[in-house]
Image (tube, rainbow, N blue to C red):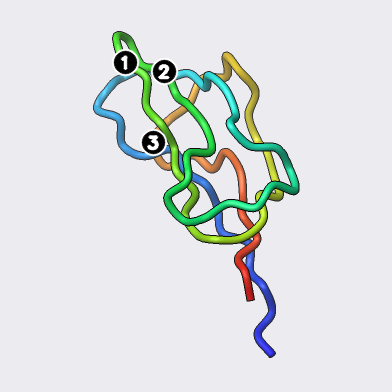
Amino acid sequence: MKEPRSVPVTVPELGAARAAFSLWHVRIGDRVTEGDRVAEVLIPGAVFDISAPTTGVFTERGVQPGDALRAGQVIGAVREDE
């Protein structure tokens, strides 16, 4: 039997010099499906959704509203379904 693995939720390339974390749409322990909206990021003049990278259980929050972000930064994690 394959061990479940933790998949990081990362900030995509947003095309802006500045970005800030806005809010979470999920709580730790929530089930998510790949592509579900899990968080929002703000850049000047726009709001971007961040999606779940896989199907499983959301297990980690690494940022809070107002935190500065950069592309590629890990902000959370999803434990992948077996």
Left or right of 19, for residue 23 = right
Residue that appears at 56% across and 59% down: 7
Quarter of the image with the N terminus in it: bottom right
Q: CA distance from mark 3 to mark 1?
A: 16 Å
Residue 46: image tag: 1
Q: CA distance from mark 2 to mark 1?
A: 6 Å
Residue 42: image tag: 2
Q: Earlier in the sequence, mark 3 or mark 2?
A: 2
Residue that appears at 60% across and 29% down: 24
Graded by Cα atoms within 10 Å as few (under 14), some (14 to 19) or many (20 or more), the crowding at tag 2 reads: many
Left or right of 59, for residue 42 = left
Q: CA distance from mark 3 to mark 2?
A: 13 Å
- Provide the secondary structure element on which disc 1 rests: strand
> Is 23 above or below relative to 29?
above
Q: Residue furthest right?
A: 29
- Provide the secondary structure element on which disc 2 rests: strand
Q: Which one is closest to the eye, mark 3 or mark 2?
A: 2
Residue 71: image tag: 3
Check whether the beta carbons of the residues at disc 2 and disc 1 lie within 8 A of each other. Answer: yes
Quarter of the image with the C terminus in it: bottom right
Left or right of 61, for residue 34 = left
Residue that appears at 47% across and 56% down: 34
